[in-house]
Image (cartoon, grey):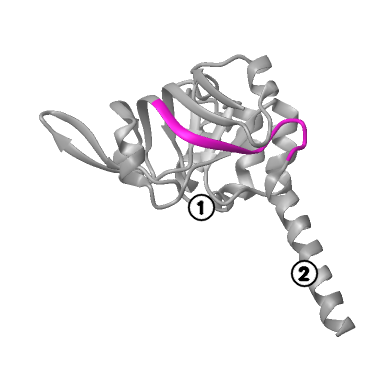
Amino acid sequence: MERNLTLPIDGATARELRVSDILFLTGTIFTARDEAHLLMLEAQESGKDIPFDPSQMALFHCGPVVSRQNGGWKVIAAGPTTSIRMELFEDKYLETFRPPIIIGKGGMGDRTQTALESVGAVYTHYTGGAGALAAKRIESVEGVEWLEELGMPEAAWLFKVKDFGPLLVTMDSAGGNLYKDLESAVAGNIKAIMERIDAT
């Protein structure tokens, strides 16, 4: 099913999303890779406020290329980062900040799958190598946090987007996992091929 969603979305909407749905997002998304994840978790643990509300946005695993232009920022490229890099702490991040949608590439592991089911969120895949295309769907930079501390690719950028996508839901809150489905299908095909070879 193709769905056009305007952020923020409520918990019921996030829980309705299923593997193979195609999403286009309008609203605010934010970027966070390894360092931003850890910084935000450490801040929360020490009682410090986060300067934005992740639960009202989509989390984008991305290290964008951004340039200064006319006193503001222009996004040149915003391709997804390989998401498995965040697997060690994504479950805790989801439970703490509760973003309803994650955007990345390559999928994530069992810890993230369990957290998605617990908080009612989905993981979506954006095509790798399409950073320039993604940048065209970003209308403006609404803000940037921890730029001096972390540098451009690791800082948390807040982007106003329109029809950002297509995003393929590959892990959902009902336990659906396209990556595991594909692994099972491939394993079955390999087994059938080997059996045919053995029979000849």
Give the CA separation, mark 1 to mark 2: 26 Å
| Magenta span main SS | strand
Numbered tag placed on residue 82 in the rendering: 1
Numbered tag placed on residue 151 in the rendering: none
Label 2 neighbour load within 10 Å: few <14, some 14-19, many 20+: few
* Residue 72 seen by the camera: yes
Where is mark 2, residue-wise? 190
**SS at badge 1:** loop
34 lies left or right of 187: left
Residue positioned most to the right:
199
Residue 138 in which image quadrant? top left
| Quadrant (top left/top right/bottom left/bottom right) for the N terminus | top right
User: Disc 1 vs disc 2: which is toward the camera?
Assistant: 2
114 lies left or right of 54: right
Report the front residue among 109 and 41: 109
**SS at badge 2:** helix
Q: Which residues are magenta?
A: 163-176
Q: Amino acid at mark 1?
A: Thr
- Looking at the picture, how far across and down is residue 45, in whole percent? 58, 32
- Of labels 1 and 2, earlier in sequence is 1
Residue positioned most to the bottom:
200
Label 1 neighbour load within 10 Å: few <14, some 14-19, many 20+: some
Q: How many marks?
A: 2
145 lies left or right of 80: left
